[in-house]
Image: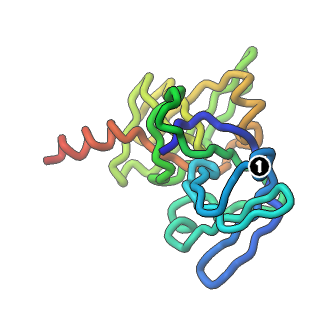
Amino acid sequence: MFTGIIETLGKVTNLQHDQGNLHITVESPIAAELKIDQSVAHNGVCLTVIALADGKHTVTAIEETLNKTSIGQLNVGDLVNLERCMQMNARLDGHIVQGHVDQTAVCTAFKALDGSWEYTFEYDAAQGNVTVEKGSICVNGISLTVVNSKANRFSVAIIPYTFEHTNLQQVREGSTVNLEFDIIGKYVARLMQR
């Protein structure tokens, strides 16, 4: 379980295709503190550490993950948002995040405002996911508050700290991001269908 509060940025240093899998090597300030078999969220995708060396860690994304997330679109040199799993005795600063991406979205608008930024993302509403204004959404692993909610899109407002310390600084119109919708909202929506 995660909180959506990004711990640090990592840099992709190697991508290796192996049958239907993709091995991703990331250099980061937390690599020395990781251990084999540990879960780490990469742009909101929970992946297991399989190797450690020289300030880098390697994880594997299987075909299912590559089909449902933007992880397969990574290139060497790209920045990724990293978060280790939550400790049960810690504060929950963001919201409950599982690291299980529901679907991707495309950035349809990006505005630099006076001291902040606004992003609008559009997603396939046919998958049954919903947002609500002032509710929580996880974009590339970042716990954010929905500003404007429509049937198939939403906006978020970004403060300078979040912009500077996450890979949102690289997201522009046309960029694909990972979305994890609020788990409580997903359960409520499922119950309402019954």
Image coordinates of residue 185 in percent, x first then y, are 33, 37
Q: Which residue is mark 1?
A: 10
Q: Residues within 10 Å of mark 1 (few under 14, many from 20)?
A: many
The percent coordinates of residue 98 (x first, y second) are 46, 47
Is residue 176 at all visible to an observer of this figure?
no
Residue 129: % across, % down: 37, 45
Q: Residue furthest bottom?
A: 19
- Mark 1 element type: strand
Q: Is residue 157 visible in the rendered structure shown here?
A: yes
Residue type marked 1: Gly
- Here the colouring is rainbow
Which one is in front, 117 or 34?
Answer: 34
Please, is residue 147 above or below residue 185 in the view? above
| Residue placed furthest toward the top | 114
Residue furthest left in the image: 194
Task: Tell whether 88 sits left or right of 60.
Answer: left
What residue is shown at x 56% (from left), y 72% (from top)?
62
- The answer to whether 138 is drawn above or below residue 79 in the figure is above
Q: In the picture provided, is 86 more to the left or to the right than 168?
A: left
Residue, x 61% and y 58% (percent of image)?
A: 70
Q: Residue at x 52, y 44 (%)?
A: 122
Q: Residue at x 55, y 30 (%)?
A: 144
Question: How many numbered markers are drawn?
Answer: 1
Looking at the image, which is closer to me, 193 or 18?
Answer: 18
Q: Is residue 180 left or right of residue 15?
A: left
Residue 36, x across and y down, in percent = 65, 62
Q: Is residue 123 above or below residue 20?
A: above
Q: Quadrant of residue 56?
A: bottom right
| Residue 69 placement: quadrant | bottom right
